[in-house]
């Protein structure tokens, strides 16, 4: 998987390389990243207001494109490893990397994950959120509630002196105790001048996920933490478009992500307004 386009949009699961350089950001640089993150958050706010049954996913994508460009941002996903759209829009059993199109239309009761990456003034912001369309059932609502909560369980562990595995363990323990499948095929990542930087941030904690290194969290580290939870199995597969990842049992999946800085005052979420 690591040589496929799908694997490179989100970091694929793999062992960390010993001696991987983690770039620490200064307070000034985190301030710039906060502006990139704010633009991502504002784009999500627009999506939240825009979503309704009957929309084509391409309409959402073009709205995001226009909003980001109007605010002098760059769209990080467009043509990234050949990805053909400005955002990833994934519906129901689609986990990540759904390609917006004229053919995909939102229906009442769907859940839709929207993943947006924005560059501004040389730095990046990255956030995904899963939304209910119209009136969703209780199973879907519970999934959204718990996946968002799992994200914040991970964020709570982002204090100086903890390790990446503390984030991973908090997400996995919370999610699996509730019976959800934690996607292990894809993981979170460092972020800064590039969308994907070291270290990797798995949403699970076992020996395979930390084969060589388990970095200590230091002031100035900035991470994109992004649990992906499934109602059923953790197993996923990729469709023939070589991008869209779905749950193997076709049950619902949710994806929540923030960009967060590790500071001496605790974790600071940058992808907020």
Image: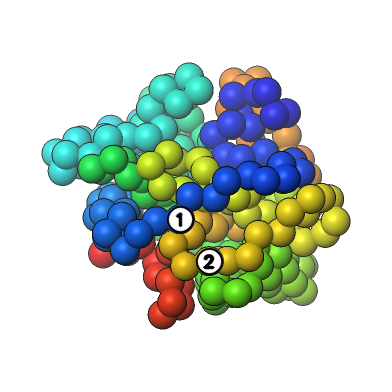
Mark 1 — residue? Answer: 24
Q: Farthest residue in the bottom direction? A: 265
Please state which of residues 20 and 175 is positioned toward the viewer in this rendering: 20
The part of the image, by quadrant, that contains residue 228 is bottom right
Q: Image check: 241 left or right of 257?
A: right
In the picture, the disc for residue 232 is: none
- Residue 189: x %, y % from top left: 56, 49
**Labels 2 and 1: the sequence-earlier one:** 1
Seen as rendered, the residue at the extreme left is 70
Where in the figure is residue 45, as x and y percent of width and height?
28, 57
Q: CA distance from mark 2 to mark 1?
A: 8 Å
Q: Judging from the image, what secondary structure is the residue with disc 1 in?
A: loop
The answer to whether residue 34 is visible is no
Q: Residue at x 42, y 52 (%)?
A: 127
Q: Above or below — where is 256 with respect to 85?
A: below
Q: Residue furthest right?
A: 207
Residue 179, quarter of the rendered image: bottom right
**Does residue 3 lie above or below 141 as drawn?**
above
Q: At 54% across and 50% down in the image, what residue appears? A: 22
Front residue of this view, candidates 272 and 43: 272
Q: Which residue is mark 2?
A: 218
Quadrant of the frame with the C terminus: bottom left
Q: Nearer the viewer, residue 196 or 85?
A: 196
Q: Could you tell me which residue is drawn at 72 percent across and 68 percent down?
A: 169
Label 2 CA crowd tier, 10 Å (few <14, some 14–19, many 20+): some
In the rendered view, does 35 fall on the left or right side of 170?
Answer: left
Q: CB under 8 Å between callouts 2 and 1?
A: yes
The answer to whether any part of residue 32 appears in the image is: yes
């Amino acid at each position: 998987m690591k040589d496929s386009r799908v694997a490179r949009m989100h970091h694929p699961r793999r062992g960390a390389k010993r001696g991987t350089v983690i770039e620490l950001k200064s307070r000034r640089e985190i301030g710039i990243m906060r502006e990139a993150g704010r633009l991502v958050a504002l784009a999500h706010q627009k999506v939240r207001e825009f979503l309704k049954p009957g929309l084509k996913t391409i309409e959402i994508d073009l709205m995001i494109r226009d909003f980001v460009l109007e605010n002098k941002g760059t769209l990080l996903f467009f043509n990234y490893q050949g990805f053909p759209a400005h955002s990833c829009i994934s519906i129901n059993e689609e986990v990540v990397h759904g390609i917006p199109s004229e053919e995909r239309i939102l229906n009442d009761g769907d859940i839709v994950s929207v993943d947006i990456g924005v560059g501004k003034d040389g730095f990046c912001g990255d956030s995904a959120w899963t939304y209910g369309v119209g009136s969703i059932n209780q199973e879907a609502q519970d999934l959204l509630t718990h996946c968002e909560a799992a994200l914040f369980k991970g964020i709570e562990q982002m204090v100086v002196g903890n390790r990446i595995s503390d984030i991973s363990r908090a997400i996995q323990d919370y999610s699996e105790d509730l019976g959800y499948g934690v996607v292990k095929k894809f993981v979170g990542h460092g972020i800064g001048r590039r969308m994907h930087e070291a270290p990797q941030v798995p949403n699970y904690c076992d020996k395979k996920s930390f084969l060589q290194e388990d970095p200590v969290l230091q002031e100035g580290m900035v991470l994109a933490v992004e649990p992906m939870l499934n109602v059923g199995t953790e197993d996923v597969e990729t469709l023939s478009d070589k991008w869209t990842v779905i749950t193997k049992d076709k049950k619902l999946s949710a994806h929540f992500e923030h960009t967060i800085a590790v500071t001496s005052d605790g974790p600071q979420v940058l992808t907020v307004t």
